[in-house]
Image (cartoon, grey):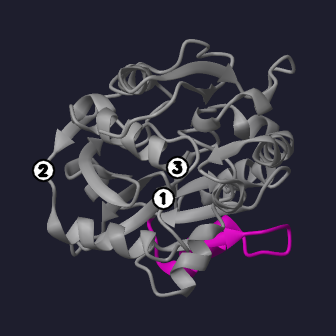
Amino acid sequence: MLNSTRQAISLITYNALPDLDPDDRLLQSALEKRGVESTPAIWNDPSVNWSHSSACILRSTWDYHLHFEKFLHWAEEVSSATKLLNPYPLVKWNTRKTYLAELSANGLPVIPTEWIHDATSPTLAQILKDRNWSEAIIKPSIGLATSGVKRTNIENAAADQEHVNKLLATSEVMVQEFLPSVHQYGERALIFIDGEYSHTVRKAPFQILAAAGQAGESLAESNPKEIEIARSVLNYLDSPPLYARVDLVRDASLKPLLLELELVEPSLFLSFAPEAAEKFAEAILRRL
């Protein structure tokens, strides 16, 4: 265990969770045992003086997609006043899911994705036809959980173009192949703390926004191939983030593919691994 002088840390949340997600209360307890005071802080509360915190740890800012530009401006301002974790450059890069195109272009195994940038891009129906996808998932490039997410198929693609057009008003639109394995095998969320693998959780597909442990997750066995792929994704970054969640799915041949790399506000499912909150607290102290 690392020793520390009494320091104050802000755990950043949003106004619907003023007392934090239950997972983050586990982190609070682990920090308190180490002599570190940690308090919830709502990211867009104008009364907060961020320079009074030794560090601001982004946790449950689950409305950032509704105030995207304001959130990025806030993160940049906070990073100039104190230590923001994960740091602002990662926040700016990771909050727009176009990072998946960058990772794919650099040889990482990303779920097949097409991008609709504006009215000049191919239509949803054309994409499904060209890709020979019978079903697909529509997502905004700025969003979280099921916000803006819609499942479509070749028969309904023309009608679902209206949904795409509405999303285009605020961000690019992703079209990803629907993989049936998400219902049998499920999504796998691999949690890393300070670059080190911690644990894996099986997630149900298309989860609504909910506190950790309230949306049907379960602890999953660690899979060496999945850990290897998750590490290869994290190795693309310049340095290990304080925390990361690597969400994987499997294609028809059961090859693991990256669905999302979560570096801003993911649930880390600390309650599923008793030592995880302790590791997280130690990692925070190393960053101070």
Give the label on residue 17, or none. none
At label 1, the amino acid type is Glu
Rendered location of residue 195, percent (x, y): 38, 61
Residue placed under numbered mark 2 in the picture: 221
Is 129 or 250 nearer to us in this picture?
250
**Does residue 156 appear in this view?**
no
Q: Residue furthest left?
A: 221
**Does residue 284 appear in this view?**
yes
Q: Is residue 212 above or below residue 55?
A: above
Residue placed under numbered mark 3 in the picture: 287
At label 2, the amino acid type is Glu
Which residue is at a point 44% across and 69% down the rendered structure image?
234
Is 159 or 235 nearer to us in this picture?
235
Q: Earlier in the sequence, mark 1 or mark 2?
A: 2
What is the quadrant of residue 228 in the picture? bottom left
Rendered location of residue 173, percent (x, y): 69, 60
Tell me if 139 is positioned left or right of 112 in this view.
Answer: right
Q: Earlier in the sequence, mark 3 or mark 1?
A: 1
Q: Earlier in the sequence, mark 2 or mark 3?
A: 2
Residue placed under numbered mark 1 in the picture: 260
Please tell me whether residue 115 belongs to the stretch shown in magenta: yes
As helix, strand or loop, the secondary structure at mark 2 comes to loop
Rendered location of residue 61, percent (x, y): 64, 32
Tell me the quarter of the image containing the N terminus. Answer: top left
| Separation of residues labelled 2 and 3 (CA atoms) | 30 Å
Tell me if 24 is positioned left or right of 48 in this view.
Answer: left
As helix, strand or loop, the secondary structure at mark 3 comes to helix
Which residue is at a point 52% across and 64% down the rendered structure image?
176
As helix, strand or loop, the secondary structure at mark 1 comes to strand
